[in-house]
Image (cartoon, helix red, strand yellow):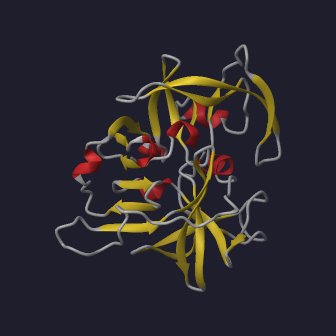
Amino acid sequence: MMMMMMKNQIHRILMLILPCLLLVGCAASGGDSAIPPTNTVPLVTTLDDGVADSQVVPIRLQDGDAWLALDTGAPFTFLFSDPAGPEYVETAGTIEIGSERRQVPGYRDEAIGVEMFQGKPIVGVLGLDFFLDVPAAIDYPGGCIVRYLDRELPASDRMLLELPLRGRENDRALIDVVLDGIELTLMFDTGAHDTILIDVVGRAGDDVIQVQTADGQRSDVYLGEAILSLPEEDPRVIVVLRAPDFPYIAPELREIGAHGLFGLTSLGWRRVVFDFEGGALRLGPLGGE
């Protein structure tokens, strides 16, 4: 199942990336011993529809500096392997990401490959495993990713809005949200721009559009809206894609008990804290206020 999911989730490799500034709250790792030890990595993004579009983090390889594309829909971090070699390589290399070093596998597919940005290559994907073993945050307004290596979240993060978070056993981030008054389980996916719902028909007023997935297939979906209700926030209208049949990802989502993908336009521009041990996805205020 893992490799099938990888094929469906890692094709959205991000390009045309522009730098953003690191803001207060994303200081470098180390420092005062009273502060929980962290690994803080810059996150470079572009914006589209007021939320993150392209997203990369800097890494260092043996032969120089490079980027990884952020995609929490990918269950693990990997490097693009040799197009002429095996599809999957258990150990493709060692990367330095912030203050940590880790060995990562290699994966190849005809639809993905190395792209250049500012003279450095995008050589792979930063997947969900970076957020699984310890509490970790993606801070879009702050322009960084933070891993709390001693498993202690700051008090400010513990006070944020909470959504139930599970899926660790499947290397997935599953959350429960309410759309149009109905509670749904969705997979939180930073590689999905909009929320997509599977096994549902379009509604009156929806526009029929055709999307081409990274495997080259085309599917008809219905572009419309829904009302998203999150705890402690006013309901708001979001963009949704309704897919009666979406073979690109639907079989895998059904297998893990998800009704679709929770995309970035539903998330909004904010801080996101993964706390799998605490069973919560914690969300900062919209707009990073």
Quadrant housing residue 19: bottom right
Between residues 130 and 286, which one lies in front from this camera angle? 286
Q: At which x and y percent is residue 73?
A: 57, 48
Q: Is residue 6 above or below residue 253?
A: below
160 or 136: nearer the viewer: 160
Would residue 263 be visible to someone looking at this image? no
Residue sitting at the far top: 204
Which residue lies at the image location 46% right of the left edge and 56% below the top edge? 129
Residue pictured at 79% horizontal, 71% vertical: 84
Residue 7 on image: x %, y %: 68, 50
Q: Quadrant of residue 30?
A: bottom left
Q: Is residue 199 visible?
A: yes
In-image side of 241 versus 167 (left or right): right
How many discs mark residues in the rendered view?
A: 0
Q: Quadrant of the N terminus?
A: top right
Single out the residue that lies furthest toward the bottom: 63
Q: Nearer the viewer, residue 234 or 37?
A: 234
Residue 206: x, y in percent?
73, 21
At 49% from the left and 66% from the top, the residue drawn is 21
Q: Spot the residue most to the front.
A: 289
Q: Nearer the viewer, residue 37 or 214?
A: 37
